[in-house]
Amino acid sequence: MKSLTSQSPIYLETINEYKRQGKAIAHFNISNLDQARAIVEVAEELKQPVIIGASEGERAYMGTDMVRKIVDELNQEYEVPVFLNADHTYSLEKVQEVVEAGYDSVIVDGAKLPYEENVALVKSCVDYVRGYEAKTGKMILVEAELGYIGQSSSLNSALPEGVSEANLTTADQAKDFVLRTGIDMFAPAIGNVHGMLIDAEEPALHIDRLKEISSATDVPLVLHGASGNTDEDLKGSIDNGIAIIHINTEIRKAFRDGEKHYMDEHPNEVAPYKFGHEGQEEMKKVVRSKMELYMQ
Ligand SMILES: [Zn+2]
């Protein structure tokens, strides 16, 4: 039986080990139990650890403690380690909430703030987490983001306002930010965008910029908003320092499409487990193809 409450040291070791091996760990968000189980079933099948993420909105919908309990239960039922990340968290108060609820990691998102305010917010959260760790002996990883990449995991007709090449993270900023905040993991803006474009190709990732950021920092790097990026770009990012890749919009779309297809075919069906199952099956295809790519 896996120990659940002391997983975070294993978490950091796993991330570093994957980075050393030139592989990445998959991070997928959930809004319900159907999605959580679909993700972990694929992880189990591929014998790969996986990170389940829940943003502020997803936590508000499911219940912050309930998400922790679901992941605890999945850890009991399946062999692979399942880590729980509090995705995009915008205030110290919300960071405290997830730390006290026993999440394994948290992302402090001050990316939309002016630089110094972002540093101050993240530093205050890191200080709080380190104090909590000293008091309890637990370990919580803190991640933060620099460079605006949009905020919502949705299908978009244009790039979110404020996302531009001028807002890509530079190596100098990344180095300063990581040093001054004391974070465990760093999410740069390298052409990645939250959400997915409906009628256009996603912008290409700036792998050369990633390479510079990777050599200027010594913490694992995390790629957000990877829905819609090409396999080639995702592999290129893993080869140049990315240790965790976040996908949300693509699995949301697959889940929705699976349910919709079933409802179109069976307009009188009312059993949620029947259309939910179709959502899971479509979503599992995306989860499987991403996880297989990250392991290559
Ligand atoms: Zn994100």
Image (spheres, grey):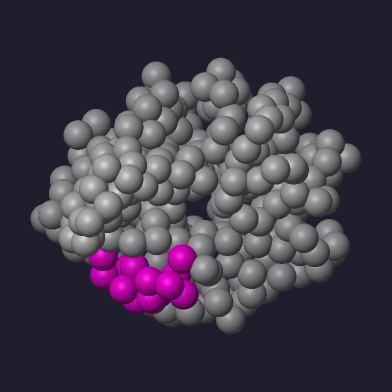
Query: Which residue occupies 64% across, 75% down?
Result: 91
The quadrant of the picture occupied by the C terminus is: top left
Report whether 138 appears left or right of 141. Answer: left
- Magenta residue span: 58-70
Residue 203 versus residue 98: which sits nearer the camera? 203
The quadrant of the picture occupied by the N terminus is: bottom left
Instruction: Give the residue at the far right of this rendering.
Output: 166
Q: Position of residue 126 (x, y in %)?
A: 60, 67
Q: Position of residue 101 (x, y in %)?
A: 38, 76
Query: Which residue occupies 61% across, 63% down?
Result: 108
Q: Position of residue 46 (x, y in %)?
A: 24, 31
Residue 86 versus residue 178: which sits nearer the camera? 86
Residue 283 versus residue 182: which sits nearer the camera? 283
Report whether 236 appears left or right of 81. Answer: right
| 121 in the magenta segment | no
Query: Which residue occupies 36% across, 37% down?
Result: 287
Task: Name above or below for residue 201 compared with residue 4.
Answer: above
Image quarter of residue 109? bottom right
Q: Position of residue 265 (x, y in %)?
A: 27, 42
Query: Which residue occupies 54% across, 38% down?
Result: 227
